[in-house]
Image: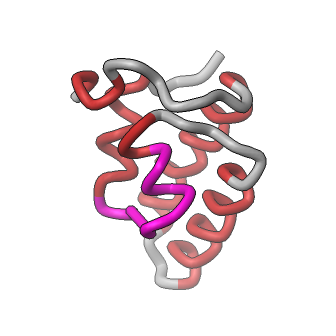
Amino acid sequence: MTTVNDAQVREILREHRDGGTISRLYATGEITEETIPALGRLIFNLEQQGLDEDAERVADVVTYAHEVGERPPVDGWVGKL
C-alpha cells in the first residue's frame, strides 16, 4: 500500500511541474503510460543535484501511480489540496 494520498501527491509535485505529464498528474490526477517514466527521470535529476530527500518523496509518488494505475483526469482533484 502506498504511503501517500492524493493531497500529498499534489504537495510533492507542486515544485516539480514540468508543463507535461507531471503537471497533468499535479493538476488533474491523470496517470498515463508516460507518468511513471517521467517521474523516474525527475528522480534521476533530483539525485544528480544531491536532492535525495526530494527524490525519495517523488519515489513515493511513483509507488502511488503504480498502485493506482492509468486513469483519466479525476473529478474534484484540485480540491484535494
Query: Looking at the figure, which quarter contains the N terminus?
Result: top right
Magenta stretch encompasses residue 70: no
Magenta stretch encompasses residue 24: yes
Q: From what the image shows, is residue 59 above or below residue 3?
A: below
Question: Which quarter of the figure has residue 10?
Answer: top left
Q: From what the image shows, is residue 47 above or below residue 16?
A: below
The residue under the point 77% across, 47% down is 33
The answer to whether 53 appears left or right of 40 in the picture is left
Please state which of residues 66 and 53 is positioned toward the viewer in this rendering: 66
Number of numbered discs present? Answer: 0
Q: Magenta region's main secondary structure? A: helix
Q: Residue 49, percent across and down?
A: 48, 83
Q: Residue 4, percent across and down?
A: 47, 27
The answer to whether 53 appears left or right of 80 in the picture is right
Query: From this viewpoint, which residue is outermost toward the bottom?
Result: 49
Residues drawn in magenta: 15-25
The residue under the point 44% across, 71% down is 51
Q: From what the image shows, is residue 38 above or below residue 4?
A: below
The answer to whether 61 appears left or right of 11 in the picture is right
